[in-house]
């Protein structure tokens, strides 16, 4: 950017990855006795918006918010879980005095001198298979006596070299032996490791990996056409158009020259059931109302301030006292019944 624009870009908005983060909770989502912010760990930034991504350990999910505060003086994992994995790094320096092959050969023979390695007892290790909830993949982990989790053959090799153990790749099997039925069964090994703070801290790493490989909900119409669930998104959009035609939401007319025409966009979402399985694909065609100017395109904005819980409570009392027949229904596309008294061109 400095070469292209001629000045250095500002990085004052960047924060340290893994720092302790506080996400503001709106007043509509809490009462007077609940905290104003949720504590979590900074894991990155949103792709298309100026928001940060914060992992909330208590709720076990990643949220995006623009109202946040970052405490870079505190490490999030160390503060919330108490332990942080430390990795050893080795710096290799090239000896410039090695000018011929004989010196190189002598150096290799010196470095490859036999060392006494301890035998590896694989029977004392714990092998655990964990199915993922969002995909059919099953992760295989090995837990040595140090309760450190190894997720690949390369991790096992590094662990053996660090602890001076004999390394035999044939002793380890990182291929799952079962199929993922989307129901995680707790085994004895799982019960033993779930009580460890190390396993709880390593669960954060699983969330980071899940966020990387997670299938994002499409943001635009073009993304739905290249999505593997293209047919489901097309069905949801056609259903939305059909609802609008049945409710006579709009009429096809020629816009007047003195009227402002608003743009529109599709908003997509996926509803899940109680077992977190995909239940329904939803799409809404909305107008870009942010392009309207106050006192030019509109005057006042009204929002309901009624506590609907009190209304429901009073209604239930009337049902019980007067003996009414009570039926609860879900009106599909209820927002389409609203009346607009001012014509809007979209």
Image: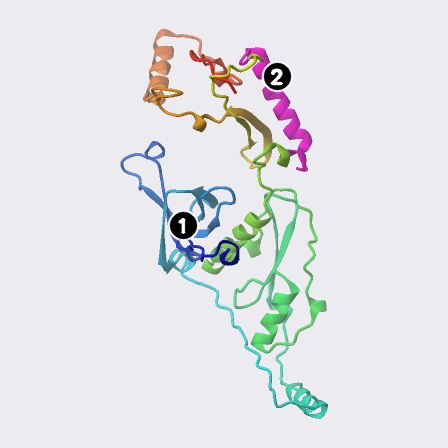
Vertical position of residue 317 compared to residue 49: above or below:
above
Q: Position of residue 35 (x, y in %)?
A: 31, 42
Horizontally, residue 88 falls left or right of residue 81, namely right
Q: On the image, numbered disc 2 is attached to which residue?
A: 242
Vertical position of residue 34 compared to residue 84: above or below:
above
First in sequence, mark 2 or 1: give its number: 1
Horizontally, residue 212 falls left or right of residue 37, namely right
Q: Position of residue 253 (x, y in %)?
A: 57, 12
Q: Write down the quadrant of residue 124 in the picture.
A: bottom right
Give the magenta-colored segment's residue range.
224-250
Disc 2 or disc 1, which is closer to the eye?
A: 2
Question: Predominant secondary structure in magenta?
Answer: helix
Q: On the image, numbered disc 1 is attached to which residue?
A: 40
Q: Nearer the viewer, residue 162 or 298?
A: 298
Q: Position of residue 88 (x, y in %)?
A: 52, 72
Q: Write down the quadrant of residue 36 in the picture.
A: top left
What residue is at 44 percent from the left and 44 percent from the top? 51
Q: Secondary structure at mark 2?
A: helix
């Amino acid at each position: 950017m400095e070469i292209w624009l001629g000045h250095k870009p500002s990085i004052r908005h960047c924060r340290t990855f893994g720092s302790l983060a506080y996400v503001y909770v709106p007043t509509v989502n809490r009462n007077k006795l609940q905290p104003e912010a949720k504590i979590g760990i900074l894991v990155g930034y949103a792709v298309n918006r100026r928001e940060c991504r914060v992992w909330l350990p208590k709720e076990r999910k990643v949220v995006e918010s623009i109202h946040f505060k970052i405490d870079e003086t505190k490490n999030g994992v160390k503060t919330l879980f108490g332990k942080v994995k430390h990795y050893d790094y080795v710096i290799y320096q090239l000896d410039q005095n090695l000018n011929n092959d004989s010196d190189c050969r002598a150096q290799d023979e010196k470095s490859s001198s036999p060392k006494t390695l301890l035998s590896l007892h694989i029977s004392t290790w714990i092998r655990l298979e964990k199915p993922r909830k969002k995909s059919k993949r099953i992760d295989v982990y090995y837990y040595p006596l140090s309760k450190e989790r190894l997720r690949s053959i390369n991790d096992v090799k590094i662990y053996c070299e660090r602890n001076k153990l004999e390394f035999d790749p044939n002793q380890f099997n990182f291929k799952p032996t079962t199929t993922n039925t989307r129901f995680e069964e707790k085994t004895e090994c799982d019960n033993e490791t779930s009580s460890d703070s190390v396993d709880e801290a390593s669960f954060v790493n699983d969330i980071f990996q899940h966020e990387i490989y997670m299938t994002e909900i499409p943001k635009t119409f073009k993304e739905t056409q290249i999505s593997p669930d293209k047919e489901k998104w097309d069905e949801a959009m056609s259903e939305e158009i059909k609802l609008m035609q049945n409710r006579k939401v709009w009429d096809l007319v020629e816009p007047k020259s003195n009227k402002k025409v608003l743009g529109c966009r599709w908003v997509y979402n996926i509803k899940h059931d109680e077992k977190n399985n995909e239940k329904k694909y939803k799409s809404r065609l909305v107008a870009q109302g942010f392009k309207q100017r106050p006192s030019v395109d509109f005057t006042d904005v009204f929002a309901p301030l009624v506590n609907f819980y009190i209304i429901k409570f009073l209604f239930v009392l009337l049902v019980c006292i007067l003996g009414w027949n009570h039926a609860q229904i879900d009106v599909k596309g209820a927002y389409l019944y609203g009346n607009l008294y001012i014509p809007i061109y979209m």
